[in-house]
Structures are given as C-alpha cells and as structure tokens.
Image: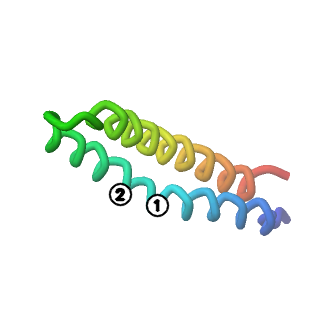
Amino acid sequence: MKHTNKDTLAKGVKYLAGALPLMFIGPSVIFSAFNNQDKPLYWPVLILGGVLSIAAILLIFKGIMTVLKALFDD
C-alpha cells in the first residue's frame, strides 16, 4: 500500500501558500500602473506587476506538481 510523502506534500502546500498573496498583489500592481499612465514610474510599476504575476503562476505550477509528486510517486 502506498503512503503519502508528508514532507514533500508540506513543501508543495508552502509553494501554494506563497503563491496566494502574489495572485492578488500582481494584478493590483498592474491595475495601479494602468491607472497612472501619465506618471514617470509607469513602466517600472508595470514591469513589477508583470514579474509578480508571473511569479504567482510559476509558484502555482511548482506547488501543484510537488503535491502530485507527493501523492503519486513512490
């Protein structure tokens, strides 16, 4: 009978927990940048929002893959 690797599962849940705030912060920063297009910091804020959003996507992917690895690998 197979058992779940609890250490790997905990690591995957930590990745997903780290992605949760980024899922809200990234789009909020992008929205803020688009509302202030006439300001001099438009491009750096927009790039920061894009980086945060991409980081959220990557952490979600890595977290889901880690959880699946904990559940289904030997």
Between 33 and 8, the residue placed more toward the observer is 33
Q: Secondary structure at mark 1?
A: helix
> What x and y, as percent, mark residue 2?
83, 62
The N terminus is located in which quarter? bottom right
Between 37 and 7, the residue placed more toward the observer is 37
Q: Which residue is mark 2?
A: 24
Mark number displayed over residue 58: none
Q: CA distance from mark 2 to mark 1?
A: 7 Å
Between 51 and 14, the residue placed more toward the observer is 51
Q: Secondary structure at mark 2?
A: helix
- Numbered disc total: 2
Reply above or below: 29 against 3: above
Q: Residue furthest top?
A: 43
User: Alpha-carbon neighbours of circle 1 within 10 Å: few (<14), some, or many (≥20)?
Assistant: some
Between 10 and 24, the residue placed more toward the observer is 24
Left or right of residue 32, residue 6 in this image: right
Left or right of residue 32, residue 1 in this image: right
Color scheme of the displayed model:
rainbow
Callout 2 amino acid: Phe
| Residues at discs 2 and 1 in contact (Cβ within 8 Å) | yes
Left or right of residue 63, residue 9 in this image: right
Instruction: Please name the residue shown 79% across and 50% down the image.
Output: 73
Instruction: Please name the residue shown 22% across and 46% down the image.
Output: 31
Instruction: Please name the residue shown 51% across and 43% down the image.
Output: 55
> What x and y, as percent, mark residue 28?
28, 52
User: Alpha-carbon neighbours of circle 2 within 10 Å: few (<14), some, or many (≥20)?
Assistant: few
Q: Which residue is mark 1?
A: 20
> What x and y, as percent, mark residue 42?
26, 35
Instruction: Please name the residue shown 53% across and 49% down the image.
Output: 60
Reply above or below: 4 against 74: below
Callout 1 amino acid: Leu
- Please tell me in which quadrant of the rendered image residue 22 appears: bottom left
